[in-house]
Each structure stands twice: as C-alpha cells, then as structure tokens.
Amino acid sequence: MKSYNIRIEHQCPQCGAPAILEETDRLFTCSFCRVRSYLTVRDYFRYLLPFNAPETDSLFFFPYWRFKGMIFSQVMEGIRHQVVDVSHQAVDLRFIPPSLGFRSQALKLKFISPETKGFFLKPERSADMIREHITDFIGLSLPKPVFYQTHIGEAFSLIYAPFYTQNGRLFDAILNEPLLQRLPEDFHAMSLAGGSPDSTIRFISTLCPDCGWDLQGARDSILLHCSNCETAWMPVKNRFKKVKAAYLPGEGGGLFYLPFWRIRAEIQGIELTSYADLVRVANLPKVLRSGWKELPFYFWTPAFKIRPDLFLRLCTSLTLSQPRNDLVQHIPKDKIHSVTLEISEAVESLKLSLTTLVKPRNEFIERLSDVSVNPKNVMLVYLPFQTDRHDYVLSRFSISINKNALGFASNL
C-alpha cells in the first residue's frame, strides 16, 4: 500500500497568519512573525476534511482512523514486511463509506480545535482495535505459523468527514451529492454519541531549557537540538525533556551524521548480556577473547524512518558490529539527519532483531514466545557517514544507505 503525506491548513498561534503543513510536520516557523513553535497533542492529531455544505442543522462529522506504519511478521521462511497506509471507520455504520479513499491525500485538511463548531461522532472503535484488525487482515496472506508480529513507525490520526441528511437521504458534504436514495427511518446522527470535538493542539516554546538558545530541527523531527550547549530535547507533554545523546567522531570533511538508538536491554529466554554472548549465539567466526564477557551487549536501531528492508539491515549490521569507539557526549557540529522514530517504536524492533541474530534461526523462532526483551538504558548516538554521489557510507562498519531511499522515507 503506497504511503502519502497529507497537507494541512493551519494558522500561526501567535499572529494568525495562514500556513500549509505536511502531516509529519511538528516544528512550525511562521513566515510572517518568525515565531517558532512545536506542535503536540495529548493522544492523536485530529483533522477535518473541507466542505461547502448548505445551511443545515443535520450536518455531522464522521470519524475515520488513519494508520501509517510498517508491519513486520516473523514466519518460518523469514521476516515479511509491509508498509501500510489505510483509513477505516471509527464508528460502525454500514451506509457510510468504509474508508476515505484518496481524499486525505487529495484535499487540504485542517486541524480540529475545541473551538471547531459541529456535531462530531465519538469513535466507537479504538486505535488498538483498528491495529488488530489491520494485523489480522495482513495475517490472512501470510504462511502459517506466524511466530511474531510488530508495528514500527506507526502513526494514528483521526480524520473527520462531513455528511448531512436531507429529505431522508444521506449527502456527502464535500461534493454535496447524495450517497443513498433512502436512509433507515431510525437513523438520526444527533442521537448517536458525540458532540464538540475532543482535541487540543499544544504549542511548546522552542527555547532550550538549559541555556535559552533557539532549539533547532527539521520540520518533521520528533527531537530538537541546541547548537549552543549541544544538547538534545524531546517533547514530553507540555515541555522538553533532555535526551542522553553522543556522537562517534569521524574523519575528513563533509560528514553527515545519522541518528541511531543504542539500547541496553534485559533479555529473558536466552543468555545475551555481553559481546561474548553475541559471538556465541550469532555463531560469529571469531575466537573469544578475554575481556569480551565484560563488554555489554547493545541493540542498535535507526532513529529515523526508512524502508522496512533497509531498517532491518541497519539493525542487524550495527548490532552485530557493536560500535565501541569512544563517544563524545554532545551533539555533533556537522550536518545531522533529523530524528523521526520514537524510542518506543525502536523498542518494538528489539525482539525482531534477535530473530536475525541468533543461530540456528529456525530453532530459535519456534521458542520466540518464551523470549522477552525489556529496555533498561537508551542513548541517542550519531554515526558519521561520508557522502558520495549516490550513497551515505559508513566504511568502518561496511554500511551504505542510498540517498534516494533516505529521501523517500519522509512518506513513511
């Protein structure tokens, strides 16, 4: 399923100037007053499709869940993966279209706020129910048994579509065209659970909590950095929380630093706490050395979204490599890629990473349900990539990432 970003009409909270945002935009800089704000919500962003309905008391807004993300499934033959971008009814009404189709990509949406007028139906189906429905649907095409499934980089949002009734007929308020010749006589939208929209967009000041400098970041970044005190900050509720960050110094000029989560975890069901354990369980062609039992084992996972196959390859390559050079406890001064993958999403990949490491693989995945992975310590680490014509290259670990693949990842 091809994935797209939706476009959203917005107003600056400071001066009211209009702006157009992408769905993934979180850092907003007003082109008129130049005030920078970070957008966040309590749970899910809520959007409204545009409409031009006649004056009527029967106008109501129907909710759809929109799910974007990567789904990974461990089967005996290997790991199957799929990029998913779908919308699904949040209220079960058989005479309402089951999905939004391409409307969320074709039309400019607006953020919903508590001041938005109208009758908004309350979702009956939770995001968890929709996630389970999508997973079950994908599972129908998978070879059995499926040993493990996980969602990585997932994003849920609620999109409300406008409808109204007239002379016993249901009308699409975007096209002002009827959908049904006749509604059930007992249907009254206002009798369903609903009312004013439940949504509040929060705007966080982008000043560094430590030094008061302007925090920097790309429009889609979930983490901002301070170039003055070289610290990293992630929004938590109504404030920024410092994130433990470091970088691996590189050689030469023109470096491009990509962010990765380095995660220390407690693993139950298999002994894997040190580098010596990794050499043993992964059956690496190395002779064990003294001191390797004291070297802690870390999972490594990208802190940015990228195609599922490349995501898995990066997880496996770096986790096997276990970078151990001395890290500098700051944000690098060279050019850096934005952090677009939450820590919680990275954690979802840990059990999946084990299935690519442990040998023999088939024996391990058969007892995968008895294995648990609990993260204990997380650090954001920037690794230095050299730039060539088509790729970003980390030669010391034999890793390369195609520039186009990284660029297209903004749609994931």
Image: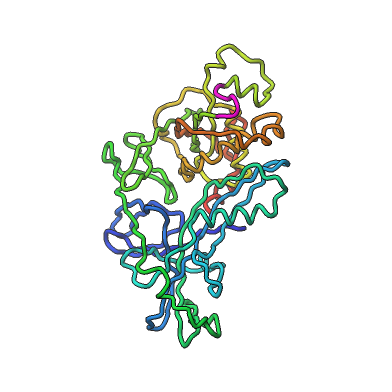
Q: Is residue 40 left or right of residue 135?
A: left
Q: Is residue 185 left or right of residue 113?
A: right
Residue found 67% across the figure and 36% down from its top: 365
Q: Disc count in the image?
A: 0
Camera-side residue: 301 or 25?
301
Q: How is the image coloured?
A: rainbow
Q: Identify the residue at the far top of this view.
A: 290
- Position of 277 relative to 108 (above/below): above
Which residues are drawn in magenta?
Answer: 268-274
- Position of 214 relative to 132 (above/below): above
The verdict on residue 330 being magenta is no
Residue found 59% across the figure and 56% down from its top: 134
The quadrant where residue 240 appears: top left
Across and down, in percent, residue 280 comes to 65, 21
Residue found 52% across the figure and 81% down from its top: 184
The verdict on residue 270 being magenta is yes
Across and down, in percent, residue 211 comes to 27, 37
